[in-house]
Amino acid sequence: MSADALRATLDALRLVDHHVHGAMMGDVDGAAFEAGFSESPWAAPAGTTHLDSQLGFAVRRWCAPVLDLPPHVDAHAYLLRRRELGAQEVTHRLLLASGVGWFLVETGYRAEQTLGPVEMAAASGATASEIVRLESIAEEVAVSGVQAAEFADRFASTLDERARHAVGFKSVIAYRYGLDFDPDPPSVADVRRAAGQWLGRRETGELRLTDPVLLRHLLWMGVDRGLPLQFHIGYGDPDLTLHRCDPSLMTDFLRRVQDRKMPVMLLHCYPYHRTAGYLAHVFPHVYLDVGLAVNYTGARSRALVAESLEVAPFGKLLFSSDAWGPAELHHLGAVLWRRAMASVLGEWVQSGEWSSADAVRVAQMVGADNAKRVYRLAEWE
């Protein structure tokens, strides 16, 4: 199989984006648009722009043609064309061009600003399912007026209701505390005591959940329900402390839940993607992706994808974009991953290290089949 033939096969593959957020609902322009392409909440230093980055250059290279612009068009012309087409048309074009056939949409982050699963499906022509964020459900329960003694039962019943329509859960304990958490479930008394302290802050409006006891309780409630449980790992915005987001820190937790046969999904993982690959190698229930970092590494994403294929079993790797906001990120996640896989696998085929049949099979596994199996998507078709 030639490099062109392998690339054509990858381009035709209908991907499953197993970790993604909704595209932005309305028009974004100027500073708001630029902010969508950085994990920093702060504006770029005076005289510079966040678009002068691997991600910004990738937008102008790969998204511009979808909007009928030449590759590498300058940012000003790109924004003018975006405004001319309008948000709905831009989103439709970019989602459609991504070639994603199924979006697993995590709805716990600024959901009021982005398309939900139903709207993502309508805008793209793809299928979409929901991933439920544990911490967001707990915070919804908290603002309902629940008392500390009732919190655990109310959270459990609410989670059960949301799980009826979800294919998985996600935790952002890496942001809220760190992955060096106590791996054992907390006692009932500890949960009630922690809930009382947390809910006591309701009058101040400070209900962002950071208590390690309650965060562990949410994890174990997710474990008990058996759906795949996603964890943010590594790279992200400055709310996290990076060295505490190394997945090796949660090794004892992985050991505790191994017999539950519940898939643990390690998301993003950069710069700990090799560590995540090791964990996926040694534990039967651990999986990983390198989604967020593929977009942010742009022209260097080939190296990242190659490294993700080093020690992790190929049945343990999944595709994701972790796109949130501008639909460019949804498109880029797919484009850059396809190109990286075609380049890496094509090189191995050309050198005689791999057969072309194996290259195609691995691309299909990582791009779609592993997610369909792990999230049992056949049950939702």
Image: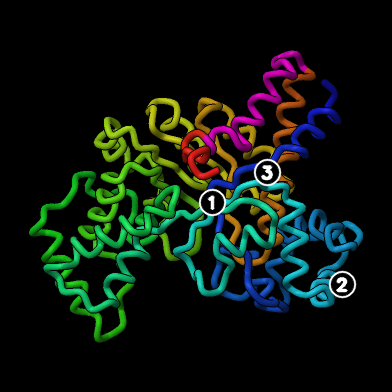
**Which is the main secondary structure of the residues drawn in magenta?**
helix
Asked if residue 257 is positioned above or below residue 148 in the image, the reply reads: above
What's drawn in magenta, residue-wise?
Answer: 351-372
Mark 1 = which residue? 104
* Quadrant of image for the N terminus: top right
Residue 261, percent from left and from top = 33, 32
Residue at left offset 71%, top offset 27%? 345
Asked if residue 251 is positioned above or below residue 100 in the image, the reply reads: above
Q: Which of the two discs, 2 and 1, labels the residue nearer the N terminus?
A: 2
Question: Three-letter amino acid code at disc 3?
Answer: Ser
Residue 200 falls left or right of residue 126: left
Asked if the residues shown at circle 2 and circle 3 are in contact, with their CB atoms under 8 angstroms apart, the answer is no
* Mark 3 → mark 1, Cα distance in angstroms: 22 Å
Question: Three-letter amino acid code at disc 1?
Answer: Leu
Q: Residue 301 carries which label?
A: 3
Question: Three-letter amino acid code at disc 2?
Answer: Ala
Closer to the observer: label 2 or label 1? 1
Q: Which of the two discs, 3 and 1, labels the residue nearer the N terminus?
A: 1
Residue 5 falls left or right of residue 286: right
Q: How crowded is mark 3: few (under 14 residues within 10 Å), some or many (20 or more)?
A: many
Asked if residue 317 is positioned above or below residue 214 in the image, the reply reads: above
Residue 124, percent from left and from top = 69, 57
Asked if residue 72 is positioned above or below residue 253 in the image, the reply reads: below
* Quadrant of image for the C terminus: top right
Q: Residue 306 is drawn in which quadrant?
A: top right
